[in-house]
Amino acid sequence: MTRTPYSSGRLPFDSKVSSSIATRRRNLRSQASRLTLRSTVAAAAFVGLGVFAPSEAWAQCVVGAVTVTCADTSTTDTTFPANPPVDRNYQGVLPTPIVVTVNSGATISGNGLAFTNNGTGGITVNNGGTISVDAGNTPTAGGTAALSLTALGGPIVYTGGDIVNNGNGNALDAKQSGGVGSVSITAGNIFAADGTELGNGRHDLVPSQRSCGAENG
């Protein structure tokens, strides 16, 4: 029997074919490496979102040099910085106003808010939502009202939405503890379930600026 050179079934060696196969293998390995890198980066990105997204979503009051800005927050009956970002009470000795902003549509619940400026700058509050105390709560830090404002002569200016105390205490206390200062209140509904809507501080209210739905009702 005459045997052909390649009757074993093995293909003849061809250097060009071998080089082409090696090139394709290198390309495939390179593509696989790039895909692995992309997958790793994507996974890292999702891990990052898993770490950071909850803190972004947490409601809180953010404190600046002379500002306090609050989103939806359930506050504790504590004085900053005891339990940030959910302290109720904030204090300063400032020649300029403590500027308080409750974001539009936000609800401050739990133990409400309190601010004291023992300097001459006063306090300015812009409430775009609702400041409230939950039923059963009796806040004491910085005052007992759902919103307690105390200044030492600087103007106290409140503008905005509702103030509601469903617990124990007044709805709004705005008082001057010394010096010469004014109090100006432009509000929506002010209500206290077990107290006074507007507490007995030293008030210099402009009648046209005072809008206290529950008290007037």
Image (cartoon, rainbow, N blue to C red):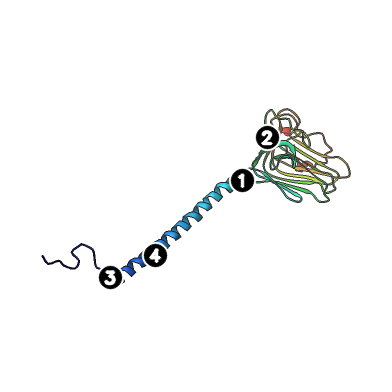
Q: CA distance from mark 1 to mark 3?
A: 63 Å
Mark 3, Cα crowd under 10 Å, few <14 / some 14-19 / many 20+, is: few
- Residue 135: % across, % down: 67, 29
Query: Is residue 156 found left or right of 165 in the rendered image?
Result: right
**Helix, strand or loop for disc 3:** loop
In this rendering, the label closer to the viewer, 2 or 1: 1
Provide the residue designation for mark 2. Answer: 110
Q: Nearer the viewer, residue 123 or 88?
A: 88
The disc, 1 or 3, on the residue closer to the chain's N-terminal end is 3
Provide the residue designation for mark 1. Answer: 55
Q: CA distance from mark 4 to mark 3?
A: 19 Å
The disc, 2 or 1, on the residue closer to the chain's N-terminal end is 1
Q: Amino acid at mark 1?
A: Ser
The disc, 4 or 1, on the residue closer to the chain's N-terminal end is 4
The disc, 2 or 3, on the residue closer to the chain's N-terminal end is 3
- Residue 167: % across, % down: 70, 29
Q: Which mark is residue 14?
A: 3
Q: CA distance from mark 2 to mark 1?
A: 20 Å
Q: CA distance from mark 4 to mark 1?
A: 44 Å
The disc, 4 or 3, on the residue closer to the chain's N-terminal end is 3
Query: Is residue 2 found left or right of 128 in the rendered image?
Result: left
Q: Nearer the viewer, residue 41 or 186?
A: 41
Marks 1 and 3 close (CB-CB < 8 Å)? no
Q: Amino acid at mark 4?
A: Arg
Q: Amino acid at mark 2?
A: Gly
Q: Amino acid at mark 3?
A: Asp
